Image (cartoon, rainbow, N blue to C red):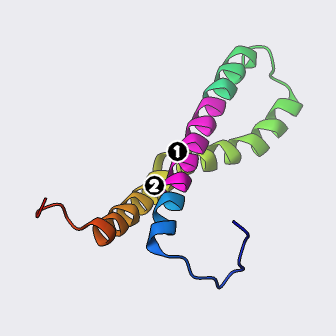
């Protein structure tokens, strides 16, 4: 399907699968970040007793804020975003298919 521009309108039947696909991609992205952070932490732990010079302090001054930011994203921001997307997907599903009480 061709991109119809920023102001195109999609039916809810089109939005729900795209939203679910985005939620899946976001989950995979978060898992990838978590795995990369674990790998990086293991590498840091391995080199830590060996690397204690000025360049390490300079590296840490750059890397530590990045690590903190990634941790905040993984632990706080991503779960909120994923919850929001899941809630929207449930609302669209209820809109399209009802709440299931009559079935």
Marks 1 and 2, the one that precedes in the sequence = 1
What secondary structure is found at the residue carrying circle 1? helix
Which mark, residue 100?
A: none
Give coordinates of residue 43: x percent, y percent.
71, 20
Q: Which residue is rendered at x = 74% and y = 41% of the image?
A: 63
Residue 42 drawn above or below residue 90:
above
Give coordinates of residue 5: x percent, y percent.
72, 80
- Mark 1 and mark 2 in contact? Answer it, CB < 8 Å: yes
Residue 42 drawn above or below residue 33:
above
Q: Which residue is rendered at x = 28% and y = 65% of the image?
A: 97
State the extent of the magenta-drawn residues as a range: 20-37
Give coordinates of residue 7: x percent, y percent.
65, 85
Q: Which residue is rendered at x = 69% and y = 42% of the image?
A: 64
Residue 84 or 25: which is nearer the viewer? 25
The residue pinned by badge 2 equals 82
- Dividing the image into 4 quarters, which one contains the C terminus? bottom left
Which mark, residue 27?
A: 1
Give coordinates of residue 102: x percent, y percent.
11, 64
- Dividing the image into 4 quarters, which one contains the N terminus? bottom right
Q: Is residue 22 magenta?
A: yes
Residue 13 or 90: which is nearer the viewer? 13
Residue 37 drawn above or below residue 1:
above
């Amino acid at each position: 399907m061709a991109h119809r521009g920023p102001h195109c309108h999609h039916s809810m039947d089109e939005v729900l699968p795209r939203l679910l696909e985005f939620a899946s991609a976001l989950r995979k992205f978060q898992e990838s970040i978590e795995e990369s952070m674990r790998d990086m932490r293991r590498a840091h732990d391995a080199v830590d007793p060996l690397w204690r010079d000025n360049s390490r302090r300079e590296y840490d001054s750059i890397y530590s804020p990045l690590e903190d930011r990634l941790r905040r994203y993984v632990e706080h921001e991503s779960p909120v975003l994923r919850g929001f997307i899941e809630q929207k997907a449930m609302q669209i599903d209820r809109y399209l298919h009802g709440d299931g009480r009559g079935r």
